[in-house]
Amino acid sequence: RKEVEQDPGPFNVPEGATVAFNCTYSNSASQSFFWYRQDCRKEPKLLMSVYSSGNEDGRFTAQLNRASQYISLLIRDSKLSDSATYLCVVNRSGATNKLIFGTGTLLAVQP
Amino acid sequence: DVKVTQSSRYLVKRTGEKVFLECVQDMDHENMFWYRQDPGLGLRLIYFSYDVKMKEKGDIPEGYSVSREKKERFSLILESASTNQTSMYLCASSEGGQNIQYFGAGTRLSVL
């Protein structure tokens, strides 16, 4: 089983739609969780951290479910510019500085 | 803004050549990382450094070495390039004790 698993997609959605991605992680001792965004042929960039209480940044909402070991990202009112690959990222247990990256979920927002 | 700069965007090398990939960060970060990214496999950690002259193997160190002589610079070395090292190489840095990593633009290496 992969340490971080994501549905690779693609998720093809129309502009204005709401879309949600889930990610599961295998190590229950992980403490830090993030969503990164990666545009085609570009580097990953931090989208948002994921906190236990859930957090929101504009149209983006991230949730953490420790009991089921999954993280979600909800995007409301999708824009064409949201088209990218979204990487679920979890810290390695016992290694605060090292991260494990999921293989990403591809989102394509259609006009 | 954090800036992580990789010396080359694209490189083409021949099998058996020694290859140097350079990475420089300007935020005085303690930690620096080298990853490779391949379709379907995601980002895989090659090497990690948490201080000058300190290094730690990642998940796939075979065929690679690293050098960190100065805090701001972390070099990845392919001692004898092979075709299976054709990949996108990404450098990242983070503050000591912090998880958030900042990436360079990547080097797309082709080994022929």
Image: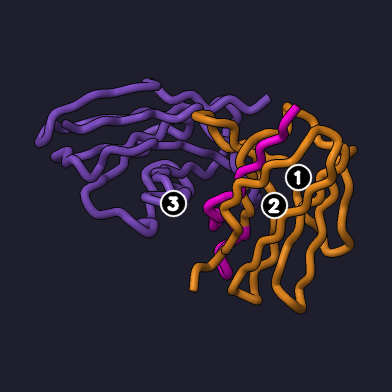
Question: Which residue lies at the image location 49% right of the left edge and 29% below the top edge?
Answer: A41
Among the chains pictured, the one given orange colouring is A
Q: Quadrant of residue A106?
A: top right
Question: Which residue lies at the image location 58% right of the left edge and 37% below the top edge?
Answer: A44
State the SS at label 1: strand
State the SS at label 2: strand
Foreground pick, B56 / B82: B82
State the SS at label 3: loop
Chain B drawn in what color? purple
Amino acid carrying mark 2 in the image = Phe
Residue A59 horizontal side relative to residue B84, left or right: right
Residue stretch in magenta: A90-111
Nearer the camera: disc 3 or disc 2: 3
Amino acid carrying mark 1 in the image = Met
Instruction: Tell me whether circle 1 and circle 2 mark residues in contact (CB < 8 Å).
Output: yes
Q: Residue furthest left?
A: B16
Q: Position of residue B24 (x, y in %)?
A: 46, 27
